[in-house]
Amino acid sequence: MENENLENKPEKLNMNVDVEVKSSCERHIKIEVSREDVDRYFDNEFKELLETASIPGFRPGKAPRKLVEKRFRNEAKERVKLSLIQDSLVQAEEDQKMTPISEPSFDIGSVIVPEEGPFVFEFDLEVRPVFDVPNWKGLKLEKPVRKFSSEDVDAAIKRIQTKYGSLVDKDAPAETGDYIVSKLVFELDGKVLSQADSETIRIRPTLSFHDCSINDFDKLMAGVKPGDVRKTKLTLSEDSVDENLRGKEIDATFDVSAVKKLNLPEVDDEFIKALGGFEDMGDFRDMVLETLNRQLEYEQQQTARRQIASQLTVGANWELPPRLLESQADREFKRAIYELQASGFSTEQIVRQLNFLRQNSKTTTEQALKEHFILEAIAESEDVQVEDKDYEVEINLMAAQSGETPRRVRSQIEKEGSLDVLRNQIVERKVIKMIMDAAKFTEVPYVMEELDEEAVDRAAGSVEETIPEVTEEEAKEAARAAAEGNK
């Protein structure tokens, strides 16, 4: 059996590989494949074509080789080029012991297979830095713990009530906790950067957007009434999408058309039946408690990850190129969404966290990449594998939160080409659990999140795509799915 595998293994290419180290993660690579191998690939290509080529005057597979070569030379050349590039890349990565973290950067159309001499092409490649796997066993970590009380469940239920509450006009001036309906206009030197005709915003101490935050927002809006206009200045993040706006101070105008207060529905049998999937109040409270415990588990994972990262990345002083950070930022952003959705956080909580990540994109991406490199190296050294059931578990959790079916969630991930992002998330979670199992813990109290920030899913400095909002029907479906999953 072993001999059969050796016989089926592709013949190694006779090639020279010149690697220029540009930085810890950047390589410029030049590959030169011998003429003998180029001719061998052409020979194999024409052998296949001889069996299927259709040429007038000859039956399929009976045309003379010289005629087939002449007629199909350009087609064969393109297929030979692609095969040589693919095979030489794989061999170069294995021989040079490189772990790519992105696709090779080069214009494949400009690569030419010569009629004579070796096949030569060069490209840039981003690779995982070379480092020794740090000692990860026996780390000393803090672990946030909390036995959720009936009061904690009541507070979580109130947050659920908020999603189903109704906004009604308020006759008195606005206070913290009330809502305003406002036109938003953001300007730089009198030029409008972005605007929203009508945005409903809850008054809290902080108001965040994709690319900035307003502190003391509650003070800015104190006593506001319909028809009032409030103005402030704010500074855009250094990680704003528009490079020309990074760090700029802009003017924000809030033209308030209404002040509203929130009327909460009664949490009774009728309410939980409307949500669906709950037999009684106890069943509903059990679901809420399960969600709180899942969020605590997420916080334990994140706290452990931060501590693990701070200890394991002490020597990770690699210089990560800006292009790499920009290309990986979207992947890290998607990974954060998947984790938050799978951990049962609400849309409001997710938007708040995503706004923070957007405003600190470079720093968070750089740290996340360093963590990923180390966790991936540990996974390889410990042979950590991802199985189909791991994807199913993760996707089912995301589906329960988003209100979509698992099939639709998986389809969307595949459509975005993000299964590898999900795979990385699963690998990292497994490695972190492995490190936690071998760690020495000191338990510390878990402090519940303070609801002092309102997050708006839009940018102030430019127009950006927002994350899809969860409709009321989707929220009901999520609650039903979560209840079924907890039975």
Image: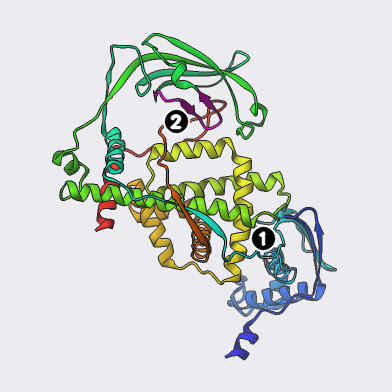
Name the residue beneath numbered marker 1: 100
Residue 322 lies, with reference to residue 487, above or below; the image says above
Image quadrant where residue 1 sits: bottom right
Q: Which mark is drawn over residue 14?
A: none
Q: What's the residue at 75%, 57% (across, down)? A: 111
- Camera-side mark, 2 or 1: 2
Question: What is the span of residues highlighted in magenta in the rendered image?
Answer: 202-215
* Residue 196 visible in rendering: no
Residue 422 lies, with reference to residue 35, above or below; the image says above
Is 50 in the magenta?
no
Q: Amino acid at mark 2?
A: Glu
N-term-proximal mark, 2 vs 1: 1
Residue 118 lies, with reference to residue 487, above or below; the image says below
Is 205 in the magenta?
yes
What is the crowding at mark 1: few (fewer than 14 residues within 10 Å), some, or many (at least 20)?
some
Q: Nearer the viewer, residue 463 or 213?
A: 213
Name the residue beneath numbered marker 2: 453
Residue 343 located left or right of residue 266: right
What is the crowding at mark 2: few (fewer than 14 residues within 10 Å), some, or many (at least 20)?
many
- Residue 357 % position (x, y): 54, 40
Tell me the quadrant of the picture where the C terminus can be found: bottom left
Q: What's the residue at 16%, 38% (across, down)? A: 268
Q: What's the residue at 62%, 90% (across, down)? A: 3
* Residue 402 visible in rendering: yes
Cα–Cα span, label 2 and label 1:
39 Å
Label 2: which secondary element: strand
Label 1: which secondary element: loop
- Residue 16 % position (x, y): 82, 69
Q: Nearer the viewer, residue 427 or 422?
A: 427
Kindly indicate whether the residue at mark 1 contacts the one at mark 2 (C-beta within 8 angstroms): no
Q: Amino acid at mark 1?
A: Pro
